Amino acid sequence: MLIVEDEATIALNIQDVLEDNGFRAPWIASRLDEVQAIIDEHRPDAAVVDLNLGGQSGDSVAEMLDAAGIPFVFSTGYGRRAISDKWARKLVIQKPFAPATLIASVRAAMDNKPRL
């Protein structure tokens, strides 16, 4: 599991929720180069992706994950309107979100994972 989030407290909260619900200890990245390194070295099962990474676009992260066949969920305070048309079919969870919403969304994304 990969968490892509530039706010440390939010990333740690997501990590706690995922671990408490049986997901493998997730990797946390806050920059594009970190995301690519984690994809290359660990190949996570899925990802939770913030749209705004301190000025870097979550769209770039989505491109990397999509190219690697890794399912993901967008996490944003801006809502669905912030998602580009290319990713309109992806799950979006609005910050702040309940732990149950996070878990249900990640599981749904993983269930629809394309087979490589």
Image (cartoon, rainbow, N blue to C red):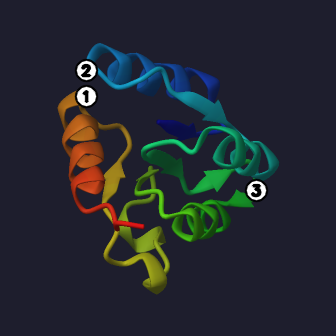
* Image height of 9 relative to 95, above or below: above
Who is closer to the viewer here, 115 or 52?
A: 115
Q: Position of residue 108 (x, y in %)?
A: 21, 52
Mark toward the viewer: 1 or 2: 2
Secondary-structure class at tag 2? loop
Which of pointers 3 and 2 lies earlier in the amino acid sequence?
2
Disc number for residue 55: 3
Tags 1 and 2 touching, CB below 8 Å: yes
C-alpha separation, residue under disc 3 versus residue under disc 2: 31 Å
Q: Position of residue 109 (x, y in %)?
A: 29, 55
Q: What's the residue type where badge 1 is placed?
A: Pro
Q: Residue furthest front?
A: 116
Which residue occupies 25% across, 28% down? 99
What residue would you read off at disc 1?
A: 99
Q: What's the residue type where badge 3 is placed?
A: Gly
C-alpha separation, residue under disc 1 versus residue under disc 2: 9 Å
Mark toward the viewer: 3 or 1: 1
Q: Position of residue 89 (x, y in %)?
A: 31, 76
Mark toward the viewer: 3 or 2: 2
Secondary-structure class at tag 3? loop
* Image height of 31 relative to 59, above or below: above
What residue would you read off at disc 2?
A: 21
Secondary-structure class at tag 1? helix
Which of pointers 1 and 2 lies earlier in the amino acid sequence?
2
Who is closer to the viewer here, 37 or 6?
A: 37
C-alpha separation, residue under disc 3 versus residue under disc 1: 26 Å
Quadrant of the frame with the C terminus: bottom left
Q: What's the residue type where badge 2 is placed?
A: Asn
Who is closer to the viewer here, 5 or 78?
A: 5
Which residue occupies 74% across, 58% down? 56
* Image height of 11 relative to 45, above or below: above
Q: Position of residue 92 (x, y in %)?
A: 34, 58
